[in-house]
Structures are given as C-alpha cells and as structure tokens.
Image: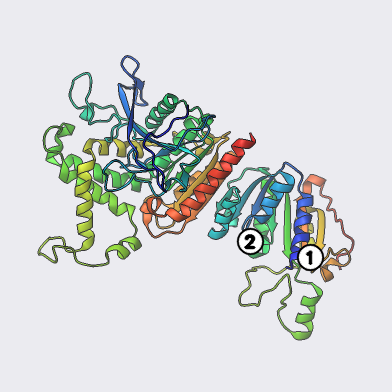
Amino acid sequence: MPLQNSKATTGTGAGLVETKYFDFAEPPDELLLDCGENVGPITVAYETYGSLNEEKSNAILILHAFSGDAHAAGWHDGASKPGWWDDMIGLGKAFDTEKYFVICSNVLGGCKGTTGPSSIDPRTGEHYGADFPPVGIPDMVRVQARLLDHLGIEKLLSVAGGSMGGQQVLEWLVACPQRVGSAIAIATAAKHSPQQIAFNEVGRQAIMADPNWKGSQYYGTEQPAKGLSVARMIGHITYMSDTSMSNKFGRRTGTNGHRRPFGNAFEVEDYLHHKGLTFVDRFDANSYLYITRAIDDYDAAAGGGLAAALNGLDARVMVLSFKSDWLYPSYQSQEIVRACKKAGVDVTYCEISSTYGHDAFLLEVDEQTKLVSHFLERTGELKDIE
Amino acid sequence: MTLRAEELAQKVIVGWVRPGCSVLELGCGDGELLSRLIEDRAIKAQGIETDGLHVHRCVQRGLNVLHEPVEEGLTDYGNGSFDYAIFNGSLQRVVKKPDIVLRDALRVADKVIVRFSNFAHYRARWQILLEGKTPVTPSLPYAWYDTPNLHFLSIADFYAYCAARAIAVESAAFVGENRVVRVSPNFFAMSGLFLLSKGYKTGGKIRRTMGEVD
C-alpha cells in the first residue's frame, strides 16, 4: 500500500498538508552524535507530498535551509501562506508530486517539531538549553536516514536543497552514496569561508549579549528577543544583494520618517526591524546558536579533499549558483563542481543570472523549475534503464 | 555552414567515435552533437558551454553540462579522463589560446576531434586577392565587425601546426558547401575535420590520410 497524503487535494499545489512525527532513539538506544554524546529520544517532524510508488523508487528528500522547517509545500489548515518552497513542490511543479514522493523534515537541533535545545531533557524534566549536545550536519543527515528507514525507503531518486540544505545534500553524497540516485545542491558550499563564519558569529554574539539569554536558560521567562532579532537582521542583509536592496527600498524613508536622532529613517531599516521581530515569534535563540555552529563547522571533505570523498560516486549531481549571491558565491559551487570532475562524477552546473542575492534560491522559480524538472526526468529515465 | 555541410560534418564525427566511449565536448552549444552521439553511439557525454541559454537547452536534452569557460574547463580533469574531446568549431571561436588548450585536451582525452572553417577556400582567396576584402563565405559568414571567430586558419596551417607540435593526425575529412571534398581540400573545402592523438604514442610518426594539401 503506497503512502499517501490523507488530505491532499487536487489543484496546482501540494494541497492541504499536515506535519507528521516520527519518534526513535528511545533510551537506552540513543543516537550517537559526531561529538561523542548520545541524544534520545528524538522526535522528527516531517511532511510528505505525492505518493510513494510500488517499487519505492520515486522518493525525493528535500533539505531545508537554516531557518526552514518540515513544511516545504502545500497549506496548513487556516494558514495565511504555504510552505517555504511551495513554488517548487506540487502538481506540475519542479518537484512534481504527480510523479514523485517528496519528503521534508525539520533538522536535529531545530525548533520546528524536531528535537533540539528547546525540547525537554528527559533526564531533568527541564528544557535542554546549552545541555543539548552539539549537533553537526552529519548528525542531521543521520536522523534523516532513520526517517527514511521508518518510511521503508532504501534509495532516494534525489536529494535536493539550498544553502544549509545544500550542505546536507553533500553530506548525503559522502555519507550514504549508495542511497542516493541523484543530488541537487543549490547556492551552497562544501565548507564555510571565514567571511561566512564571521557573519554567523556576529549573530551568535548578538544573542548571547542579550541579558535575557541567561546562559541559554530563558525558557519560561522573557526570551532574548533583541539579540535574536539583531542576528536575523544581519542574516537578511547577507541574503540580499546591493541591487536587490536598491530595487526594493531605494532611499525611501520608512514609516517613522526622519525622526532625529536615530529613528528608522529609511525603509530598509523598517524592513530589517520587521524581519527581526517576526523571526523572534517563530524561532528559538538556542536553535540559532546550535544550527549556525553546525553550518560553520561543516566540511563535506572532513578535512581531506572533496574529490577523494566523492570518488566512485554513482549519483548524478547538479550544482546551481546565482550570480549576485555574495554569501555563497559561485566560486564555492564551482569548487564542488571541480571535485566532481576530478572524481569522475556525472555533473551539471549552471550559474543562474539573478539580482536577488542568496535569496534567489527561493525566488528564481522559473529557471530552477526548468533545470530541476529536466534533471529529475533524466535521472528517472536512467533508473528505468538499469 | 549550409545544413547539408553541417550534416556531413556531423556524420564524419559520429563515424570517428567508437560506440560506448566517453566524450567531452568543449563549447557544446545546445547539445545537438552530444545528443546525436548518445543516440547513435551510446556514448557517456559531458559538455562544457559558456552560454546560459545553451546550458538550459542541454539540461533539457538530459545532458551533463557545465556552465563555465571552455578554457578553464579542462584543467580539473585528470590525464586520460575521456576517450574523446571534441571542439566542433569552438577552438577558433571561443578559445583565446588554442595552442595551450589543444595540448591540454590531448592530455585529458585519448583522441581529440577538431573542426574549423577553412580560411584558404578559393572564394576567400578570391575576395582577398581580387576584391581586396576580408572574406565572407558560407563557412565564415560574418563581417569583420561582428564575427565570433577569434582565430583564422587554413587546413594547411593546421597540418603544419600538428607537425610542429608532433600531434598525430589519425584521420582527416573535408567538407565543401554540400559535399565531401577529396581533392585539394585547402582550396575547395569550407571546413576541415581532424582526428588527433598525441604524436609520441605513434612513435613520433605523423600520419597523414590525405595526399597533398593544395
């Protein structure tokens, strides 16, 4: 009996969807993390769209970026907006739910239903806070692999994701190459540059400098809202480009006008304040610290050469970057491509013209749709030939 | 190039490529040749192309393609990574330093196929000599101000180059406006096609399949 969404409706999107939960790693069978510590039990929040075929060969795992969640597509009951990649996932879209069974789960260490620092530590009955063990991108992938075991999926048709999602794509390739038929890594890097680490560190320092952070134990009291919103403001600057900011805001004054001396003078300031404040309502400050640390620490080659790590890989790889993305510049994508070339891996690379900066992976829908849908179609054909 | 000439040239290339081999095409355009090679010769194909629209078309055709400059495309591949590397017009069009790139192609692939437009075709000679004009012919159909070609060479030039670099010409074919040219190709052929390999592999002996060039 193929898995199916009970509430999937017809239309162009993934329809009405619900987040589901999978529990595992009950003590004493906890999950061993890269840091050497165990964690358990673990709850994984996930969603699925479309139907798994009889051969279980049409599954695609979508991997979310830093602040994303399991709700990648479709609508939750009563919601005002759809999932974060709804433009790309659904009937007739790039990840066509007519053909593919699409899965997305919240990462370990997150705060959107999967176990993380805001979860209750069963040993103490309190929120973990800083007692939560450090997690890495490989640990996130380990948890996803367990979810696939639970869903009875041995091999994925594809794994796809942008930014931090792209790092997880690379980790799938190096850690579980036999379970992946193809991979789509978008606007990502095999390892963070000092500049990328630096921006994340400013965000972390903003949170920890907030007196409400209280060494991570702010649960049940006021949260470090100021610090977290400043961190998010920095993030949003890095996600945009000089051009996209000029196009979006120009030098127009914000709602407060030129109130002296330091009121919000410009629309771009209003925008950042708004983004920062709304982020506080949907994200946990400790998850911010844990996940940015995981991103910064990650090196797909684990200190060695990426080409050696990818050697013998059977999966086809597609790498996409965006011209105006200065947070994850094209040269980082090209490094992944170069490693694929050296390792003899079938690889496709395209640098998409866009002015949106890093945000382009969420906004440049048309070009990505063409590239991704054709790439997946070909992967499906090759699989049929086997 | 006329359609007929294009078809003849493609036929030559397809005929040279052994079935089931790996092929790297540098400057693969919209992927037409690679697709044909996959269909007719069941090759494993990899393309490199700088034009974004062409890259999209290649992906649509199901090809593995890299959106990057041809000149930087070779350096990352190890020795003998492919059975064939193909420059279907791209060596004179997009490569700034053909000498360096061609030698790198011979490192990366066992055999290299090069196709270029012949600057010494009799119509070109006529235009230079009698009209005093830069030639415009079916295989060089551009005026001086809008030509995509960076280098102008003749079939005789290319033979001389291969001899000087000890590159073995394993086979050569020549195409006119709508037929294969067998006599005096440097005079009658619109374009030349060469199947090359590293000279020293054949003991430094430079083979030539055609007789006198002119």
Q: Chain of mark 2?
A: B
Residue A26 figure quarter: top left
- Viewport quadrant of the C terminus of chain B: bottom right
Report if residue A206 is visible in the image.
Answer: no
Pointer 1: what residue?
A: B155
Quick one: SS at disc 1?
Answer: helix
Which of the two residues, B64 or B88, is positioned nearer the viewer here? B64
* Image: A232 above or below B29: above
Quick one: SS at disc 2?
Answer: loop
* Image: B128 above or below B186: below
Three-letter code, disc 2 = Lys
Pointer 2: what residue?
A: B97
Which of the two residues, A119 or A4, is positioned nearer the viewer here? A4
Locate residue B71, reporting x and y percent.
Answer: 59, 56
Kindly indicate whether the residues beneath marks 2 and 1 are on one polypeptide chain: yes
Report if residue A96 is visible in the image.
Answer: yes
The tag on residue B78 is none
* Image: A136 above or below A187: above
Q: Is residue B56 left or right of residue B199?
A: left
